[in-house]
Amino acid sequence: MKKFTKLALVSSIALTTNAMAMQAMDDTALSATTGQDGLSIGIGISKIEIEKLLIHDNDGLVSDGAKAAVAPVLDANGNVVTPGTPAVLGSLGGTNKAAAIVIKGNGISGDANEKHGIVIGANYDNNGAYLLTSRNLADLVIDSDAGTSGTGGAFINVAAQVSGLDIKIGEIGVSASNAENTSTTSIRRGNDDKNYNAILSGLTLKTGKMDANIQLGAAPQGAMVKLNTKMIGGLEIKNLGILDNSTKGKAVGSVNVGGNPTAVTTKEAGEIFIESIKIADADSKDLTLNQDIQVFNDAYVGGGTTLGKAAHIRIVSNDTGAKDQYIKGIHLGSRTAASIGDMEVQGLQTYYSTSQGSYTKGAVITISGH
């Protein structure tokens, strides 16, 4: 399915820039903004629950043997190295029929995600150490500025401070999409529950405090969104389960029962289950973030009519030093299987290249539709 990474990106931006608050901004916090033109906002929502989230891919995967368009390959200066040509796909099982990525409740009685695919609240760990001083989950300061002609002119600047979040995600799967709704009483489209396969059994994300700066209109800071902050307490991913439905109901051997060979068959999908993944700066508990997020429209070769690169979102992670990761409780086959132990990665550093043979510390991620 295409757009899975887009879903992750859009969700993360939405959670950090439209975050919630435990209480309205109090008089003390408001008084700190007086004497300065502009707008300060404390958002007073304590929890968000989403029953089901669906991302529909309306044309599915191209059918077997069909040709898929391949964009031209460009060099670092935007020159065409290889022109775009159709590529004949092999047997991938595509049907050109609409399907959807589905995030829904996991059905586990008493669990926070029993009936809701996404539940978002404050990270109350460590006696509130990961919350803003204002006790808001997000404080926004908004200013308008005339800018300069050299940097594109006027713009709006939004400085956002975000408390730590506790994000619980239920089961994630893929399902056939229902037909688009033409009803006059509802806009729901939904999915075909009879044609559904789970992919992830769920996960929990815990974040620390962080800052972001957003510019709309001109962006003299060089990107629409800039993250340049230290996430107090680092990032933790908990209870991550990856499912393999190809092994559900499959025979894995045979035993002799009463003199007759009897198949030994699975009842549920196989699962790789990880109890916890912690990410922080090398030899630290906190995580430094320095990202530029830009949104690009279609780009054309030499300003002409040949599409060189389709519209996309680009995330550049600048050098913030090496990272440590600690992966706790790796279970293979099912979450109740014996753990093979923990895994630790020290000093992980990534690089990207702007030209052949050059290496810059950081990473570049590009997200777009087909």
Image (spheres, rainbow, N blue to C red):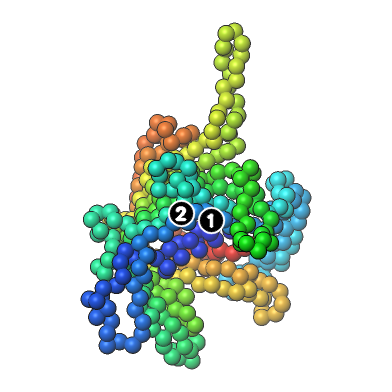
Q: Is residue 214 above or below residue 122?
A: below
Q: Is residue 251 above or below residue 40?
A: above
Left or right position of 254 against 343: right
**Residue at x 36% of width, y 82% of height:** 39
* Three-letter code for the amino acid on which mark 1 is drawn: Leu
Q: Quadrant of the C terminus?
A: bottom right
Q: Quadrant of residue 188?
A: bottom right
List x then y, in percent, for residue 89.
73, 51
* Three-letter code for the amino acid on which mark 2 is drawn: Ile
Residue toward you, 138 or 147:
138
> Label for residue 273?
none
Q: Is residue 256 above or below residue 144?
A: above
Element type at marker 1? strand
List x then y, in percent, for residue 367.
56, 63
| Residue 345 showing in the rendered view | no
Q: What residue is pinned by disc 1?
A: 53
Measure how far apart labels 1 and 2 are at the Cα level.
8 Å
Q: What residue is pinned by disc 2?
A: 118
Q: Residue furthest top?
A: 259
User: Going from the N terminus, do you reach mark 1 or mark 2 first?
Assistant: 1
List x then y, in percent, for residue 153.
48, 89
Question: Label 1: few (<14), some or many (≥20) within 10 Å?
Answer: some
Residue toward you, 166 or 186:
186
Q: Is residue 370 above or below residue 177?
A: below
Element type at marker 2? strand
**Residue at x 48% of width, y 61% of height:** 11
Residue toward you, 188 or 232:
188
| Residue 27 showing in the rendered view | yes
**Residue at x 37% of width, y 72% of height:** 160
Q: Quadrant of residue 132?
A: bottom left
Count the marks: how many? 2
Q: Say whether marks 1 and 2 touch (CB < 8 Å).
A: yes
